[in-house]
Image (spheres, helix red, strand yellow):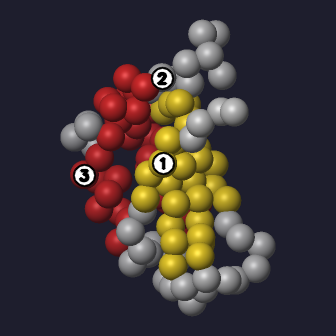
Amino acid sequence: MSATGDTVTIHVTYTGEAHARFDRAWYVERHLPLVLRLWSRYGLLRVAAFFPAVAQDGTQAVCECTFRDAAAVAAAFGSPESAEVMADVANFTDMTPRRTRAAAI
């Protein structure tokens, strides 16, 4: 968390059937480093990937992206580099990513 407590967490989820195509190795070894490399200049601080322990329909993967603040989120997703990030999705899945801003309670 930043000194002012303004960090923003975005969850990017991939939902589908248990047998849906999702290349975890590509996602962890290539996609997430790409995202961090391209968006860190805008305020992306860290990324982490989470997967279900057993194959089942529903959520297949979650990426937790932590940004410096709300302005960093807007800058990253609105950046020219976003096209490269989004184009890479086809390399590891056919599922559509869904973004959700996490809320602390």
Per the image, the residue denoted by label 2 is 69
Instruction: Determine whether 28 is above or below 66 in the image.
Output: below
Provide residue 6's location: percent of width, then percent of height: 55, 18
Q: Earlier in the sequence, mark 3 or mark 1?
A: 3
In the depicted view, which residue is nearer to us: 63 or 27? 63
Provide residue 73's location: percent of width, then percent of height: 40, 32
Per the image, the residue denoted by label 1 is 100
Q: Nearer the viewer, mark 1 or mark 2?
A: 1
Q: Amino acid at mark 3?
A: Ala
Q: Residues within 10 Å of mark 2 (few under 14, many from 20)?
A: many
Q: Horizontal placement of 62 versus 98: left or right?
A: right
Provide residue 94's location: percent of width, then percent of height: 39, 78
* Residue 32 visible (yes or no): no
| Residue 49 found in image quarter | bottom right
Q: Residues within 10 Å of mark 3 (few under 14, many from 20)?
A: few
Q: Amino acid at mark 1?
A: Thr
| Residue visible at 22% across and 40% down in the picture | 80
Q: Secondary structure at mark 2?
A: loop
Q: Residue furthest left?
A: 80
* Residue 21 visible (yes or no): yes
Q: Nearer the viewer, mark 3 or mark 1?
A: 1
Dots 1, 2 in contact, CB < 8 A: no
Quadrant of the image containing the N terminus: top right
Q: Amino acid at mark 2?
A: Asp
Q: Earlier in the sequence, mark 3 or mark 2?
A: 2
| Residue visible at 29% across and 53% down in the picture | 84
In the depicted view, which residue is nearer to us: 74 or 22? 74
| Residue visible at 35% across and 72% down in the picture | 90
Per the image, the residue denoted by label 3 is 83
Q: Earlier in the sequence, mark 1 or mark 2?
A: 2
